[in-house]
Amino acid sequence: MIENFLAGTAALFGDPITILIFVFGVIGGMLFGAIPGVSMLTLAAILLPFSAGLEPAQGVMLFAVIYCTGTYGGAITAILFNIPGAPENAPTAFDGYPMTKQGRAGKAVGAAVLCSAIGGTASALLMMAATEPLAKWAIRNIGPPEIFALVFFGLAVASSVGGNTIWKGWMSVLLGLLVATVGQDPVGGINRYNFGLTDLAAGIAFVPAILGFFAVSEIFIQAEKRAFGKYNAPKLDVNFP
C-alpha cells in the first residue's frame, strides 16, 4: 500500500497543472475558511461545476485541500477575534482567544498550524489503512444499542468541556439538544417548536447557530470596547511551540 501511495503521489505532483490546482486550493480554502459564515463548503460548491473538466485525481485533491486548509483558516478568526470561521473551529476559540488577550496570539496560531498539519496527516494515513476493516467490523457488530451508547458517550464527553463545573457542561448539552429538536420530525413528519414559521421546518442550521453564539456577542463586546477607547487590535506574529 505504501508503494502505491508514493507512486500515486509522485505521478500526481509531476504535472505542473496539478501543482497550480493544489496552490489554488490552499489559498482559496484558507481565505474562505477564515470568513465566518462562508466556510470552505461554499468554495467547494462554487468550484463543483468546474471540476467536471479535471482528472478524477485532480478533482479529489482539490476538494481535499480546500477542506483541510479551510479548517485551519477558520482557526485564525477563532483565535484572533473569538469568531470561528467554521463549526469545527469553535473549540479552538475556547483556548486560542484567551491567549490572544494575553498577547500570545502568534503562539496560538502557530500551535494551530502545527496541530492541523500533524493531525491531518496522521488521520489521513489512519483512514486509508483502517477504513476497509473498520467498515466490515461495523456492519457486522454495530446495531441500535451500540449507536445509542456511542451517542450517550459523545454527550458525556461534550459535557466535560465545562471543566470543573459539570452542571454547566450538562446545561450546554441540554440546550444543544433543545435547539436540535426545532424543525420537522424526520420519522413522523410533525413540526416541532417552529412557532408556525415555515423557515424553521428544516430546523436551525448549524452555521447560523454558531455565528449567533460566538460572532454576534463578540462583535458587540468589541464595539463596546472601541466606544470606550479600550479596544486593542491583536498583533499576529506566528510562533511555533
Image: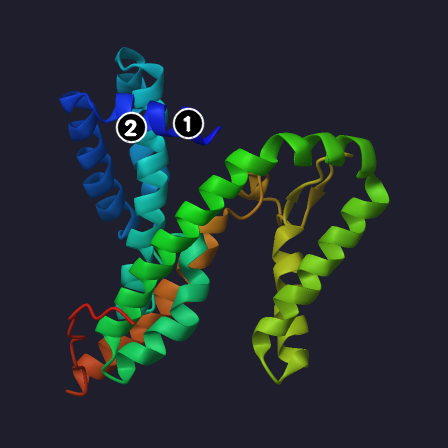
What type is the residue that disc 1 sits on? Glu
Front one among 3 and 15: 3
Q: Would residue 17 be visible to someone looking at this image?
A: yes
What count of labels does the image hold? 2
Residue placed furthest toward the top: 53
Colour scheme of this structure image? rainbow
Q: Which mark is residue 3?
A: 1
Kindly report the distance in space between the C-alpha atoms of the residues bearing marks 2 and 1: 35 Å
Q: For this view, does 237 lie left or right of residue 140? A: left
Expressed as whole percent of the image width and height from the top left, the position of residue 70 reads 32, 46
* Image quadrant where residue 44 sits: top left
Q: Earlier in the sequence, mark 2 or mark 1?
A: 1
Residue at the extreme front: 3
Residue topped by disc 2: 46
Q: Is residue 20 left or right of residue 78?
A: left
Q: Residues within 10 Å of mark 2 (few under 14, many from 20)?
A: few
Q: Is residue 121 left or right of residue 20?
A: right
* Residue at x 26% of width, y 12% of height: 53
Q: Nearer the viewer, residue 196 or 154?
A: 154
Q: Position of residue 1 (x, y in %)?
A: 49, 28
Residue 36 can be seen, yes or no: no
